[in-house]
Amino acid sequence: MAFSAEQALSLLRKAQANDRLANSYLITGTDAAATREVATGLTGMLVGDATDPMKHPDVHIAEPESKSRRITILQVRNLERELQMRSLRGGHKVVVIFDADRLIEQAANAFLKTLEEPPRNSYILLVSSYPELLLDTIISRCIEIPLHPGVRREISDRQRRLAGMLRRYFAGPRPEMPQIFCLVRDVQALLAEAKATISEETDAAFKSEEKRYRQASGVSGEWLDDREDYYKALAEARYRNERSVLVDTLEAWWADVLRQQHRADHLDLPDFAADTGVLAGKLPVSTVLERADAIGGLRENFGRNVQEQLAVEVAFMEAFAP
C-alpha cells in the first residue's frame, strides 16, 4: 500500500508517540519532492528540530558525489564513524542516504552490519526512486515506506493502449480461449516494446558518457565498467517499474468495475468509465474480486521472478476467462 507524504508522516508520528519507531527505514517513490519531504519530516521528529533538521549537527547525509554519481565505500565508512561517535546534542543520531540505489556494491555490503544492528540511539533512512537496484539484504533490513504521487497523473501512452486492448476485448462477442491468447500476445508485445525502448535510452546514455569521459584524462577502464554495470541495472529497474505500472493499470480496470458497482465517484480510468460500467452491470461482485485477485497474483509472481510469459498467461487465464 502506497501513502501520500502527509499520510506517511502522520503514521510515523503515531509510531513515535507509542515508542514504536524502527531504526531503519526505506522511503521509496518516484516523486523526489515527496520522498525528501518524508525523510526531512521524520528526521525532524527524531532530532527534535522541525525548522531545518537536515542541518542539525547529529544528522549526517550521503548523496552521490563521485564522478560516476555513485555513493562510495568511503562515504559509507564516514557515516558509520559518525554513528559510532557521541551525539553532539545528547539526542538521537540520524543518517540519511539519498539515492540509496546508487550505493556501489562494496559500500552496500559494508553497510549491512550497521543496518542490522545500528548503534544505540541512532536511526538510518534510505531514500530511493529505484529500490529494485538495492540489494535484497538491504531491503530486508528496513521498513519500507512506499509513497505515491500526491496529484493524479495522466496515464501514459502504454497504459492507455493497454486499457484500449481491454476495451476491445470486452466489446466483442463473449470472449473464448483464442481471444484470451490474442490479448496475452498483445500485452506481451507491449512489454517487449517497453523493454526495447528503455534499453535504447540507457544504452544511448552510457555511450554518451563513455564518449565524453574517454576524452578526459585520468578515467580508468574500471570506472567505465562500473558505469556500464550501472546502466544495465538501471535499464532493468526501469523496465520493472514500467511493468509494474502496466499491472497498476490492470488492477485499476477491475477496481473501477468494483467502484461502479458501489456507485463511487472516483475512477482511476475515467476515460474508460463506459466500459467498466458495462462490466459492473454484468458480473457479480465475487467474480470481479476473483479477477482482481488474479492480477494481484501476477504482481506477486513478478516479484518472485516467475518467468514473465508464464506469469502473464496464468494471470490472464484467471482474470479474463470467459
Image: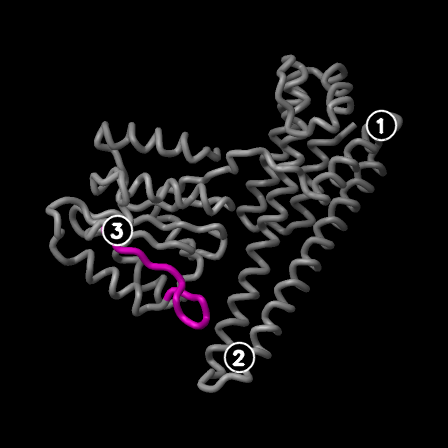
How far apart, in angstroms, are the residues tagged by discs 1 and 2?
54 Å
Residue 85 found in image quarter? bottom left
Residue 195 found in image quarter? bottom right
Instruction: Tell me which label, 1 or 2, sits earlier in the chain.
Output: 1
Judge from the rendering whether residue 309 lies leftward or rightward of residue 152; answer left or right. right
SS at mark 3 in the image: helix
In this figure, which residue is indicated by the disc labeled 3?
A: 55
Name which residue type carries label 1: Ala
Tell me what residue is drawn at x 65 percent, y 24 percent: 267
Judge from the rendering whether residue 243 lies leftward or rightward of residue 9; answer left or right. right
Instruction: Tell me which label, 2 or 3, sits earlier in the chain.
Output: 3
In this figure, which residue is indicated by the disc labeled 2?
A: 213
Name which residue type carries label 2: Tyr
SS at mark 1 in the image: helix
The span picked out in magenta is: 59-71
- Main SS of the magenta part reads loop
What x and y, as percent, mark residue 286? 64, 18
What x and y, as percent, mark residue 30? 51, 46
Estimate how packed mark 3 is, as few (under 14), some (14 to 19) or many (20 or more) residues with alpha carbons within 10 Å.
few
Estimate how packed mark 2 is, as few (under 14), some (14 to 19) or many (20 or more) residues with alpha carbons within 10 Å.
some
Judge from the rendering whether residue 274 lies leftward or rightward of residue 208; answer left or right. right
**Residue 145 drawn above or below residue 114:** above
Instruction: Tell me which label, 1 or 3, sits earlier in the chain.
Output: 3
Residue 72 found in image quarter? bottom left
In this figure, which residue is indicated by the disc labeled 1?
A: 171
